[in-house]
């Protein structure tokens, strides 16, 4: 029976009190019997949690009581077993490391495209202005190997901090095209899209909510394989189901 609720969520928002938040969130998560990882930084929050549904949703409600996190929108899936071994809350320099401090999503996002629009563009082979559409996988190579969009650009990066140099190396290949950057849950493709726009690429978008939201809203059309996740489930199918072990 799938009675463990798994959530992932992030938000780029200034959190100068990240160290104080760490203590409070860690204590509350333990009290609710949750496991997973919460990353905090001055640029925002990134979390992966699992536990009984009522406990998880209680924790999310408490997060949303902070006005800065009121619109936090977790992506949900269910599993038979707890996929995490412990509860970790860490303060980091970045909630997703890019090593480019000028990329600050809290100051303004790159345009995001909802899953239904991306599916329609891929169905028709071009965007609404007739421009060729390419999907750009911003994940690490080992994640891509589990599955990706059909024909997606894959630069075989080893870690996300390699992405900026990869853009500079391949920028000419993207000229004149509409580029949809994507990742597991949205956090990497959000920074990626901002960086590419700053690098001079005009028609760059991020897939709203990442692959997991795309699965939820479209059933996974144009996607081949599964989506790697950073817990003991290893990978999720287009129905957000885990691999059977």
Image (tube, rainbow, N blue to C red):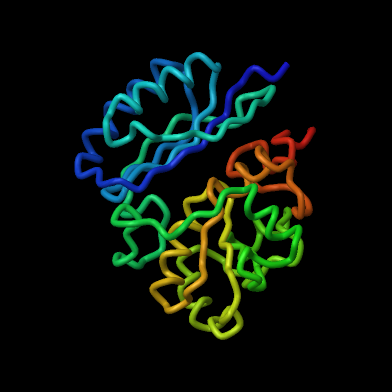
Q: Is residue 231 above or below residue 120?
A: above
Q: What residue do we see at 28% from left, 36% from top?
A: 68
Number of marks: 0
Q: Quick check: 71 left or right of 144?
A: left
Q: The C terminus lies in which quarter of the figure?
A: top right
Q: The N terminus lies in which quarter of the figure?
A: top right
Q: Residue 152's spot in the image, x, y percent?
A: 69, 66
Q: Is residue 231 above or below residue 64?
A: below
Q: Residue 141's spot in the image, x, y percent?
A: 64, 63
Place residue 235 in its image quadrant: top right
Q: What residue do we see at 50% from left, 36% from top?
A: 48
Q: What residue do we see at 61% from left, 21% from top?
A: 4
Q: What residue do we see at 47% from left, 74% from top?
A: 202
Place residue 96 in its image quadrant: bottom left
Q: Residue 212's spot in the image, x, y percent?
A: 62, 43
Q: Nearer the viewer, residue 109 or 91?
A: 109
Q: Residue furthest front?
A: 129
Q: Nearer the viewer, residue 235 or 104?
A: 104
Q: Residue 2's spot in the image, x, y percent?
A: 69, 20
Q: Quick check: 124 left or right of 59?
A: right
């Amino acid at each position: 029976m799938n009675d463990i609720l798994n959530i992932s969520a992030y938000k780029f928002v200034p959190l100068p009190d990240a160290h104080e938040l760490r203590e409070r969130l860690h204590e509350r998560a333990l009290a609710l019997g949750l496991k997973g990882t919460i990353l905090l930084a001055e640029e925002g929050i990134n979390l992966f949690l699992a536990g009984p549904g009522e406990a998880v949703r209680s924790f999310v409600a408490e997060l949303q009581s902070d006005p800065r996190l009121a619109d936090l929108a977790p992506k949900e899936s269910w599993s038979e077993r707890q996929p995490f071994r412990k509860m970790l809350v860490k303060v980091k320099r970045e909630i997703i490391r890019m090593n480019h401090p000028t990329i600050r999503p809290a100051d303004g996002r790159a345009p995001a495209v909802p899953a239904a629009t991306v599916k329609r563009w891929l169905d028709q082979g071009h965007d609404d202005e007739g421009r060729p559409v390419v999907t750009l996988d911003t994940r690490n190579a080992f994640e891509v190997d589990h599955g990706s969009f059909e024909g997606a650009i894959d630069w075989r990066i080893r870690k996300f901090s390699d992405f900026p140099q990869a853009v500079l190396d391949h920028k000419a290949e993207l000229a004149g095209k509409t580029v949809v950057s994507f990742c597991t849950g949205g956090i990497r493709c959000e920074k990626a899209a901002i960086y590419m726009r700053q690098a001079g690429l005009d028609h760059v978008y991020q897939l709203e909510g990442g692959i997991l939201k795309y699965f939820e809203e479209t059933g996974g059309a144009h996607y081949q394989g599964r989506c790697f996740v950073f817990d003991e489930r290893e990978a999720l199918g287009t129905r957000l189901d885990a691999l059977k072990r």
